[in-house]
Image: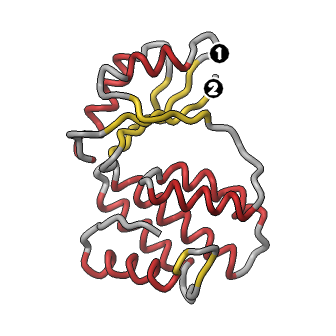
Amino acid sequence: MKRYFIHLQNKEYTPKDATVLLERARELVRGAIVRDSRVSKKYIEFDTSIPDSMGIDNLVGRLQKISPIASFEHIVEKDLPKDEAIKHAIELFNEEKYWGTHEALEAVWKATPKGSERDLINGIILVAAAFVHDLKDERDICLSILGRAMKKLDGASGSYHGIDMDRFVGLVNRILQTGRIERFTI
C-alpha cells in the first residue's frame, strides 16, 4: 500500500462538509482506503492509501468527480535537513495543509534533544494538529489541543526559523480566550 494526500480544489465546501465528502470519496474509490477528509478554504484533502496494483492516476481520476485536482503527495518519511524540514512545514502550514505540517515537523521533533526547543516544535505540531480538527468541524477537539499546545509554547518568544513566535503564541492565546477559531499564517 502507498499513502497519498490528495488535494482537490475547493470552491464551495466548508469543514461542515468533511464527513459527507469522506463518504462520497469512499464510494468513488472502492479498492483504496480513504482514511480521512479535511476541508480548508483552498483544498479538500483526502488521506488515502492505495494498493500497489492501483495507480495514483486511477485514484485521482475517480476523486475528480468531486472537484478538480490541485495536487497530490506520496507520503513517505523524508529525512530532510532541519532547516529544509522547517521551511517545508511553514509552507504547508500557510497552505492550510496541517497534517502535512505535522508530518514534516515530526522527524525534526524526534531528533531534537529534550528541552525548550523540542517543546516549541511540539507546540507548533500541536497547533497544526488542532487545525486539522478544525478542518473537520471538530471545534471542541481543536480548542482542547490548542490548550495543550500553549503548555508546550510557554515561554516561546522571538524568531524560530523565521516564525515570529510572539505573534504565533499571541494568536493561539486569542483563539483560546475568545473561543473563536481563526486559522492564520506563519
Q: Residue furthest left?
A: 12
* Percent position of residue 172, x then y: 40, 76
Taking 131 as reference, is 84 left or right? right
Name the amino acid type tagged 2.
Lys
Residue matched to label 2 = 2
Q: CA distance from mark 1 to mark 2?
A: 7 Å
Q: Secondary structure at mark 1?
A: loop
Helix, strand or loop status at disc 2 = strand
Q: Position of residue 46 (x, y in %)?
A: 43, 35
User: Along the horizontal axis of the image, is 49 left or right of 25?
Assistant: right
Q: Is residue 69 above or below residue 54?
A: below
Residue under the image location 41 percent in, 39 percent down: 45
Look at the image and tell me in which quarter the N terminus lies: top right
The residue positioned 72% from the left and 46% from the top of the image is 78
Label 1 belongs to which residue? 52
Q: Quadrant of residue 28?
A: top left
Mark 1 crowd level (few <14, some 14–19, many ≥20, 10 Å Cα): few
Relative depth, front residue between 97 and 68: 68
Point 62% across, 10% down: residue: 53
Q: Amino acid at mark 1?
A: Asp
The quadrant where residue 85 appears: bottom right
Q: How is the image coloured?
A: secondary structure
Count the marks: 2
Which quarter of the figure has residue 81?
bottom right
- The spot of residue 88 in percent (x, y) is 61, 56
| CB-based contact (under 8 Å), mark 1 and mark 2 | yes
Q: Residues within 10 Å of mark 2 (few under 14, many from 20)?
A: some
The one of 62 and 20 positioned closer to us in this rendering: 62
Nearer the observer, 132 or 62: 62
Decide which of tag 1 and tag 2 comes sooner along the chain. Answer: 2
Asked whether 17 or 162 is in front, the reply is 162
Q: Position of residue 142 (x, y in %)?
A: 37, 62
